[in-house]
Each structure stands twice: as C-alpha cells, then as structure tokens.
Image (tube, helix red, strand yellow):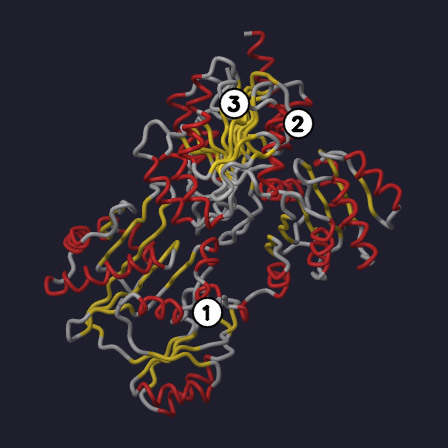
Amino acid sequence: MAILVTNETKLCVSGITGREGTFHTLNNKNYGTDVVSGVTPGKGGQDVEGIPVFNTFHDAVAETGANTAMIFVPPRFAADSILEAEDAGISLIVAITEGIPAHDELRVYNHLARNPDVRLVGPNCPGILSPGKANVGIIPAAFFSEGNVGVVSRSGTLTYQIGNELAQAGFGNSTIVGIGGDPVPGSSFVDILAEFEADPETELIVMAGEIGGSAEEEAAEFIAANVSKPVVAYIAGFTAPPGKTMGHAGAIVSGTAGTAKAKAEALEANGVRVGRTPTEVAEIAAEIAGALRTA
Amino acid sequence: MDLLEYQGKQLFARHGVPVPSGAPATTVEEAVAAADEIGYPCVVKAQVQIGGRGKAGGIKVAKDRAEAEEHAKAILGMDIKGHTVHEVWIEAASDIAAEYYASIVFDRSAKRPLVMLSTQGGMDIEEVAERDPTAIARLHVDPLLGFQDFHARRLAFEAGVDADVVRPIGALLNKLYDAFVGEEAMLVEVNPLIVTTDRKVAALDAKVTLDDNSLFRHPDNASLRNVAAEDPQEQMARERDLTFVKLDGNVGILGNGAGLVMSTLDVVAQAGGQPANFLDAGGGSRAEAITQAVEVILSNENVTAVLFNIFGGITRCDEVARGLIEAFNQINPQVPFVVRLDGTNDVEGRQLLADANLPNVHTESTMLGAAKKVVELAG
C-alpha cells in the first residue's frame, strides 16, 4: 500500500528547469515515478527530456492532471510556489527547499490548514520514497527496498543512516517520509504516524527526531492513545548546547525546552523504545519484529 | 540572530513603539558626548547578549558628566558572565511609576504568534510564571488575521493594567506585533515595559531575536550582526558558508547533514569523547567545501583528532575523498583523522584514500567503529 507517494502519484515539479531540479526530477522519473509536468514561469512550452514545462501550476494541472507537487525553487520563491500549487488543486505538496523564512511557513501552514484536501510535507525535507512504487525528492532510493517498516524523520542523511542499518538487518520499507528540519513543518510526526497506522503494508514504525520544539513529545502522547503498531524512536542532539541552532532551523534548544533528553523520556514514558544510536534502533526493530513473528 | 538592546530599540522605533531616547557609544569619549547631548540624569547600559546586566553592575544612572565618565570607564570592557562589553547605550532616564512585561513569541507548537502581557515586569518572567501563572495574560494570534484591537483589550484587561493606560498599552502591543511580523522576529520581549509618572508607556528594554532565514530580504538587519562578540572560528565558518557550532572538546567532527552530524556528536560522546565542534558540510559537498571545512576545524588548537562521518546520498564519497586529499596537500594536518565513507561511490572514495596513503588517516566502515577509533586517538 504505502502512504502519500504511491503508484497513483502524478508529479509536477516547480523549479524543474533549474540544475538541482532537473537532476532530481530525472532521478525520480528513472526510478519509475510518473513525472507528468514541471512549472517554471517563462519557460512554458519547453520540455525537460520529454516532460512538459508550464508557466503556472494552473496550466500544468489542467493539462496533465498532476496530483503531487515537488517544490524545488529558492527560498524567496518557495512559499509562493506552495500556495500556487494548493490553489491549483494539488493534493500533496513536497517542499524540498531549505531556508524558507519562518514567517512565510507560518502563513502557509495556517492557510493550508483550512483546506482538508491538501497535505504539505516539508519544507527543508528530503521528500518521500515508497520503495518499488515511486520517489518524490532526493532520498537515494538504491539503498532501500520494499517492506513493512515505515520511517518518519526530521533529518535527511540521518534517515539514510538509520535506513541503511535497518536494511542490513533485513528490513524493507513501506514508505520513508522526511518531514524536514524546519520550525513549522507542513506535516508533523503525529500526521504521518496516523497515516502509517492506517496503512496495511506498514507493521512497524521508526521515527527519528531531534532537538527543538515539542513534536516528539506530542507524538509520544498520540502514540499512546492512537497507535497500535510498534514504534521505535531515535533522537539526535543529546550533545547539543542550548541556544545554538544545530544546522536545521528547527533544531535549537530554547532555555530548557526541546532537549533530546526530554523527548526520549516522553517517548519512553509512552511505551516507545528509544535507541541510543542508529545501530541500536535497528537492533530494537529486529527484536520487535522477531517478537511479532512468534506472537 | 540576537540583537543588542539598543538595536532592538531602534527596530522598535521604526515601527512606532515608544522607546526612551538614546545613543550608542564604543569609547568613553563617545559615551560622555552622548550623555551631554541626552542630558542628565541618564543611564549607562552595557550592551551584551546576556541577562543579569544590572546585577553585574552593567547598568548605572549618571546624574552628571563626571558620573557618566566614571560609569562608562567601569562598564566598557567589563566582563559580564563571560561576555565582554564592547558597546554601551546612553539613555535618557525615565520616571517609572510601574514596570510591566510584554512579549511576542513565535510559538512553533501552536503555529501562531503568542502574545503575553503582565503587570509583573522588571523581574524574571519565568519566576512569575511559576509562582503565579494567572499573572500572565496570554493569547495566540491568527497570522492571517493579524493583531486586532480586541486582542489588545483582552490582554490589557486580563493582565489588570491600570485603567488609564489600557489604550496606550494596547497601541504599543499593536506596534510591537507590527515589528514582530515586519522584521520577521522569532521573539520580541520588553521587560520592563514601563508606565511613567506622567502616564505614558515605553519599552525600557528590548530583547529581539530575528529569523536567520529572513535576513536575505532584510539587508539592514543582516548588517546588525554583532561581529565583535562572535567567536573567530564561527566567523571563519560563516564567511565560508559552513554550518558550524563551536563546542568545548577536542574531537573535531565533520559530517553531511545536520541530523547525522548531531547524531555523530552524540555517538562520540557516548564513546567517551568530547566533540570540539558541529560542522555540517551539506549535501552534495564538493572537494573545495571539504578542504575549507578541514581548515576551520583545525583552526581550533584544542583539536587532537578529527572524525569524518559521511553517509552519501546526494553527496558522493569520491568527492569527499578528493576534498580530504586536497586538504592534506594544502594544510598538512598534524592530528590523526578517522574517515568513515558510506553510500554513493563509497568504494571509489575509500580506494582514493587508500591510494593517497595520507599520513595518520584511518578508515573505518561503521559509524560506531569510527567514533570509538577517533576517541581512542584523541586521547
């Protein structure tokens, strides 16, 4: 089954004619994703290796029936592109761009929240990969195969590290969702956990969090009340000093709020096992999977 | 990006938030000239990014020129909790009748700005919150609606401000919100927000944190960066567009991706080591970026060993290897390196390193193994 990105995905890429945009769009297409169009204002009528480019999302959706958008434009244009995609009727928007101003994200989030038919994932995220079905974003698909473990993470390369450890332990993935490292992500852990809980293909869930904000704490409470499938977590940033942004705009301990320790404790208090290293996450997952099989 | 008090006040003033008049000074002469201009009594205030200035003797009232000179001499160059005072702000003294508190916070959990108001200003607001949470009036503002007059009234009446200042406080909050949104702040805090004896309101202090990601469209704000107070290594990193945070230890760290780097710091610490820095070389790192990163890490004399933890997705391990080899050509490091290359083109990358036969460079295949090795070598 997988979640969000599936065989039904029809992808339109905003920023398709840029260097990074073209590179990753073609990677996604070569993987088997149905890339139907791209949007670059002023380049309507052109094509990128056969993928038609339009001036607006409105035109792209009308002509090609795109239902998913990947946003690959620079920060100063990204919020506007997200809003444009939503306005054109896109139902899943995956925003890869890093560096979008927080107030833009705040306005975008609040506007999108009023539309029950749209979901935003990201910004500042590597995208969504459903192995064997489709890839939207920059996750290196070659490392992953189809399976029953859902992964949701705020990080990019840490996700690949954890994913690689899981793969080496024999696991495959239903879907890997990067929710991104920004302070106002379009989708939270809670949103994606709900999707995994409802997905028949997913039997075990791995979540990778980090310092800053309270998304992991909120997830912990949600899991206790609503998630029947086993969840294993990892939290990065035990060594981070307060007040310093550690790479991701959202990765900052403010005063005493948002520490890795508090997040790990909240998760453990709600029945979620927390691996102390990426390797331990795979070990716990293996333990749980073994228990599931003999149950 | 954190602003100094006077920068915050100048930002407030641009949006019509009432602030006492003042002028900055970096020398005693400038301070005295400013004090003469502003008139007496005036206040000499240390400009540092840390609280507790008053207790440390960094805020002093001057009733005449002699005192202004004396205070400026004492405060400039003073150390306040590890921060050196490079600048002072000379401000007209205010006749304070009451000290309130107001702030606007970018509440990422609620995904709305949170506005707070209390009549218990001039003290630690966290203590107030603990002692009596009802003393702080709070409400969230829908960013698509903006701050309305009714928000102001709700806060003012709930906080219990003096009846005659309900409107002026409301007007101040309105302008504070304008500043918060217009300048793209993550936090604006006014403590104390004063009511003067002639029943006017003003921001007597200003704590402003701006969103770093917004600075590209606020060049005036971008130029306010407090370079004098910045660690030279962090400055070096920033000039090279590297995401870098200085830490206290002796194990230099480089990785690709913020989450992976944070994780690397944790794993090194668990192995008994002390990270010297966080450095995210970013996705798709090219050889030149790697060389510059090594330069920054080694500019810290405390570093006795360096760990490269690379899991390449978009980043290609052979590019990282080339960068490291080039770094060794240019810099000739004297400390051991542990390199873990995994992911895209990892075989090519490890081969390049093996062929280059760099002195004191150890390769490890796992993240855990690499962390243990570097801790062993760092001593």
Assess disc 3: are there few (<14), some (14-19) or many (≥20) residues with their C-alpha within 10 Å of its C-alpha.
Answer: many
Using the image, determine if residue B305 lies above or below residue A86. below
Q: Cα distance, mark 1 to mark 3?
A: 46 Å
Instruction: Please tell me whether mark 1 or mark 3 is closer to you in this view.
Output: 3
Assess disc 1: are there few (<14), some (14-19) or many (≥20) residues with their C-alpha within 10 Å of its C-alpha.
Answer: many
For this rendering, which residue is in front, A19 or B48?
Answer: A19
The answer to whether B300 appears left or right of A70 in the picture is right
Please, what is the three-letter code of the amino acid marked with disc 3?
Ile
Please name the residue shown 36% across and 50% down the image: B106
Where is mark 1, residue-wise? B48
Asked where in the image residue B180 lies, by quadrant, the reply is: bottom left
Please, what is the three-letter code of the amino acid marked with disc 1?
Val
Instruction: Please tell me whether mark 2 or mark 1 is closer to you in this view.
Output: 2
The answer to whether B115 appears left or right of A184 in the picture is left
For this rendering, which residue is in front, B101 or A106?
Answer: A106
Where is mark 2, residue-wise? A165
Residue B45 x, y percent position in the rendering: 39, 76
> Furthest-front residue in view?
A45
Q: Chain of mark 3?
A: A
Please, what is the three-letter code of the amino acid marked with disc 2?
Glu
Mark 2 falls on what kind of element?
helix
Q: Cα distance, mark 2 to mark 3?
A: 14 Å
